[in-house]
Image (spheres, rainbow, N blue to C red):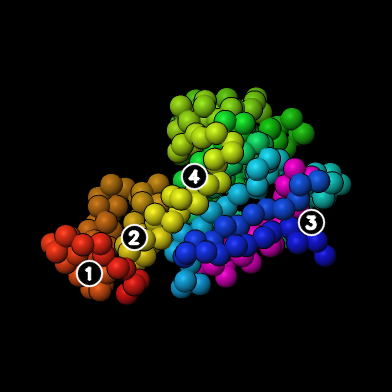
Amino acid sequence: MQQVVKIEKQQHVAVVTIHRPEAKNALNTQVRQSLAEAFRDLSDDADVRAIVLTGGEHDFAAGADLKELASAEPIQMMQRRTERYWSAISQCPKPVIAAVNGYALGGGCELAMHADIIIAGKSAHFGQPEVKVGVMPGAGGTQRLFRAVGKFHAMRMILTGCLVPAEEAYAMGLVSQVTEDSETINTAVKMAQGLAKLPPIALEQIKEVALMAEDLPLSAGLSLERKSFQLLFASQDQKEGMQAFIEKRKPAYQGR
């Protein structure tokens, strides 16, 4: 069977690459299963502290593979249980950076929004064009997009199915940074390497608490933030970080 997801590890950073160039990295079942397996493994890998998710130099993911869906029945769609594959990514406790070139459409746009940071090349285009083939977003496009860019940008994208270029996506808050296409992956990897030098437990707590802000009232979110802040004083990394600052040296974090 073709290897549709490739994983490279170096200096506490894992690069996960979707590899279906003949289909513009369309997300068929094999890709979704392979991505889920990769993220479950990397979540448990103590040597990995940050993850870059990319489709390579040309396309991130041009959407779902419609050849698998065109004749599907409702019960078949339900029994596919694809939410299990997506949750392996959304529940990853480590920082995830999406490096997007070319198309990130439909499921590809939804996949990018599972990341914590999105770096886009100037060629990147984002969109939720499902309405143009008679359906709607089914993996968070009506939910994560609203939270990311607000009602009016999101409604334009999901109702019209329009494509949004990288610079516009940046202006509306969907993208963290725009780079030259040739630098997209390198920029994401360098950022991941920087994250990998920071205390892993603190990063995990920051990610967990920040993502909960979407669902919690402010008072509950502030309480969770305060408790997580206090918890970090039980870590060796907190002692190392503050002592290194006092001693004017670089800290060496161990994730303990």
Residue type, numbered disc 1: Glu
Give the vertical position of 74 relative to 235 (above or below).
above
Q: Secondary structure at mark 2?
A: loop
Quarter of the figure that contains the C terminus: bottom left
Residue at the disc numbered 1: 240
The dominant secondary structure in magenta is: helix
Residue type, numbered disc 3: Gln
Q: How far from the left and from the top, in percent, is residue 147?
A: 46, 39
Q: Secondary structure at mark 4?
A: helix
Q: CA gap, disc 1 to disc 3? A: 53 Å
Circles 1, 3 touching at the beta carbon (< 8 Å): no
Q: Residues within 10 Å of mark 2 (few under 14, many from 20)?
A: some
Residue at the disc numbered 2: 198
Question: Upstream in the sequence, badge 4 or badge 3?
Answer: 3
Q: Relative to 33, is 11 on the left or the right?
A: left
Q: CA gap, disc 4 to disc 2? A: 17 Å
Q: CA gap, disc 2 to disc 1? A: 11 Å
Q: How far from the left and from the top, in percent, is residue 176?
A: 45, 38
Task: Find residue 246 and report its image quarter.
Answer: bottom left
Q: How far from the left and from the top, in percent, is residue 117?
A: 46, 46
Toward the right, the furthest residue is: 71
Numbered range of the magenta stretch? 23-43
Residue at the disc numbered 3: 76
Question: Upstream in the sequence, badge 4 or badge 2?
Answer: 4
Task: Find residue 184 and report its image quarter.
Answer: top right
Q: How far from the left and from the top, in percent, is residue 100?
A: 59, 41
- Residue at 51% over, 58% down: 51
